[in-house]
């Protein structure tokens, strides 16, 4: 390995270890004095305690005397190699879970298989400094990051439940435990959970399999809550069946504590990340489809939704009315009272229109002071009456103490009329200008012929 590449690797390893908030012993095992010296100094400067040795035998001696949080060892060492050293490390109970990084320049698959069987956590090529940095970061940052969440746990064995509940509480998770699946499902309907853990064989009328089926057959977002299945039978066909039913993970009983901890952690983190992505997607959708000032739909939404309104009206042949609303002399409001006052006028107008709409209606802001309201299943006479109510409501708003009025154009698609949104909009827009010609602050109706 070139000296410059080796130095770069050492600096990156040291920088990564320097991110750890807790001072710990880090054991470096390498036959190269340069490697040991540089890394030793860098780790010490970053606030951790490096212990560097040049042989596996000395490394084992250190492990018997000092607590070590990470072992980073070369494959090629005098005496026993890095793989044999790993076997020695794993033979010590206190180091069964300690991360062990094996540094090597070989890509021998047989050797890699032998290393993992010996208990090596990761194998890293000496020349790939960035990858080594990323892996070291993952080992420690994952341990530091706390998981928060709520777990629904179903287990009818008190002994087994005691073990799992104790583990989950140690992870700072909130746990609701039930012996029966029907009781758990009742709680699931009322509460939001980040994870379901269930034994497959349960007392009562609903088994663990039945619980999985019921959750996955829901039509709400709750159907996607991850499920960790527990079973005392390690049967491959049963595992396949459970995965087909919709469980996310599976482990046998009695479970290993660290295995359960890792599986629970991964499932909750993935679920919460998905929730976050969906929330951000919803926010982006709202930003793209909603007018941020008024809370109404915007022109993009109107283009997308209006054709569906008209196609449904044509298919089932029901009336559909359209209002085009324009605030009178809005430029004067901005000029005389300021743009903040103008924005407040628009915002309060938007809120009023939202309140005036029924389920199935659509209100949108399509221009500066122009609004459109689609009235589903609405006859022309009803549309004119509702337009009059809106006209009076706008005049009564008086936002910022300013008198505001509106001119409203009304038209309607009658039963049996094959008309598109663009055609009806032009008619309603024409009706709105007729209202302005007639003196503003009024409603004008132009029929669709």
Image (spheres, rainbow, N blue to C red):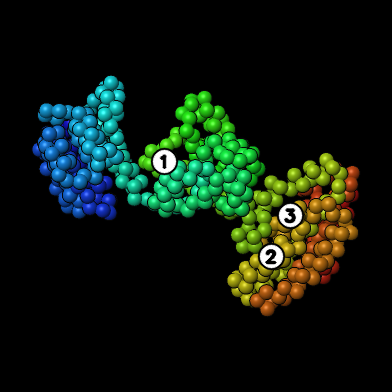
- 232 horizontally vs 410: left or right: left
Q: Which residue does the image show at 15% across and 37% down from the upper left?
A: 60
Q: Which residue does the image show at 68% across and 78% down from the upper left?
A: 401
Q: In this figure, which residue is indicated by the disc labeled 2?
A: 351
Q: CA distance from mark 1 to mark 3?
A: 50 Å
1 or 3: tag closer to the N-terminus: 1
Residue farthest along the bottom direction in this orientation: 401
Residue 91 place in picture, x, y as percent: 23, 34
The quarter of the displayed image where residue 56 is located: top left
Mark 2 surroundings within 10 Å by alpha-carbon count, few (fewer than 14), some (14 through 19), many (20 or more) = few
Q: Which residue does the image show at 25% across and 31% down from the upper left?
A: 125
Nearer to us of marks 1 and 3 is 1
Count of numbered circles in the view: 3
2 or 3: tag closer to the N-terminus: 2
Q: In this figure, which residue is indicated by the disc labeled 3?
A: 362
Q: Which residue does the image show at 72% across and 66% down from the upper left?
A: 352
Q: CA distance from mark 2 to mark 3?
A: 13 Å
Q: Label for residue 260?
A: 1
Q: Quadrant of the N terminus?
A: top left
Marks 2 and 3 in Cβ contact (< 8 Å) = no
In the image, residue 212 sits, relative to residue 442, either above or below, namely above
In the image, residue 439 sits, relative to residue 86, either above or below, namely below
- 34 horizontally vs 353: left or right: left
- 436 horizontally vs 367: left or right: right
For the question of whether residue 196 can be seen, the reply is no
Q: Label for residue 410?
A: none
* Nearer to the camera, 177 or 372: 177
Mark 3 surroundings within 10 Å by alpha-carbon count, few (fewer than 14), some (14 through 19), many (20 or more) = many
* Nearer to the camera, 173 or 364: 173
Residue 93 place in picture, x, y as percent: 25, 39
* Nearer to the camera, 445 or 61: 61
């Amino acid at each position: 390995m070139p000296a410059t590449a080796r130095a770069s690797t050492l600096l990156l390893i040291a920088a990564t270890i320097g991110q750890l908030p807790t001072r710990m012993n880090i054991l470096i095992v390498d036959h190269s004095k340069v490697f040991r010296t540089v890394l030793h100094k860098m780790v010490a400067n970053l606030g951790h305690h490096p212990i560097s040795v040049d042989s596996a035998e000395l490394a084992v001696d250190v492990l018997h005397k000092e607590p070590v949080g990470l072992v980073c060892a070369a494959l090629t060492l005098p005496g026993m190699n890095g793989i044999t050293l790993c076997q020695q490390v794993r033979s010590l109970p206190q180091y069964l879970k300690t991360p062990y990084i094996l540094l090597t320049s070989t890509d021998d698959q047989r050797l890699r298989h032998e290393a993992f069987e010996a208990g090596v956590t990761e194998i890293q090529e000496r020349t790939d400094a960035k990858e080594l940095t990323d892996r070291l970061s993952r080992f420690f940052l994952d341990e530091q990051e706390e998981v928060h969440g709520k777990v629904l746990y179903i287990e009818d064995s008190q002994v087994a439940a005691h073990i799992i509940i104790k583990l989950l509480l140690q992870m700072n998770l909130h746990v609701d435990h039930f012996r029966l699946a029907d009781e758990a499902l009742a709680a699931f309907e009322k509460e939001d959970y980040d994870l379901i853990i269930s034994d497959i064989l349960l007392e009562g009328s609903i088994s663990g399999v039945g619980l999985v089926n019921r959750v996955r057959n829901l039509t709400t977002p709750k159907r996607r809550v991850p499920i960790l299945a527990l079973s005392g039978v390690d049967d491959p066909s049963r595992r396949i069946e459970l995965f087909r039913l919709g469980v996310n993970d599976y482990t046998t009983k009695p479970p290993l504590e660290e295995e359960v901890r890792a599986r629970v952690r991964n499932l909750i983190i993935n679920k919460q990340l998905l929730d976050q992505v969906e929330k951000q997607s919803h926010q982006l959708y709202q930003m793209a489809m909603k007018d941020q000032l008024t809370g109404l739909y915007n022109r993009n939404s109107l283009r997308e939704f209006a054709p569906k309104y008209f196609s449904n009206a044509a298919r089932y042949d029901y009336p559909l009315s359209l209002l085009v609303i324009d605030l009178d002399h809005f430029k004067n409001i901005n000029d005389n009272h300021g743009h903040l006052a103008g924005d407040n006028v628009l915002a309060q107008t938007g809120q009023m229109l939202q309140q005036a709409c029924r389920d199935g209606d659509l209100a949108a802001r399509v221009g500066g002071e122009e609004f459109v309201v689609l009235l589903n299943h609405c006859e022309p006479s009803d549309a004119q009456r509702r337009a009059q109510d809106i006209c009076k409501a706008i005049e009564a708003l008086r936002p910022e103490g300013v008198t505001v009025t509106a001119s409203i154009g009304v038209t309607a698609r009658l039963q049996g009329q094959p008309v598109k949104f663009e055609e009806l909009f032009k008619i309603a827009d024409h009706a709105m200008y007729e209202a302005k010609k007639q003196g503003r602050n009024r409603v004008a109706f132009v029929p669709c012929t």
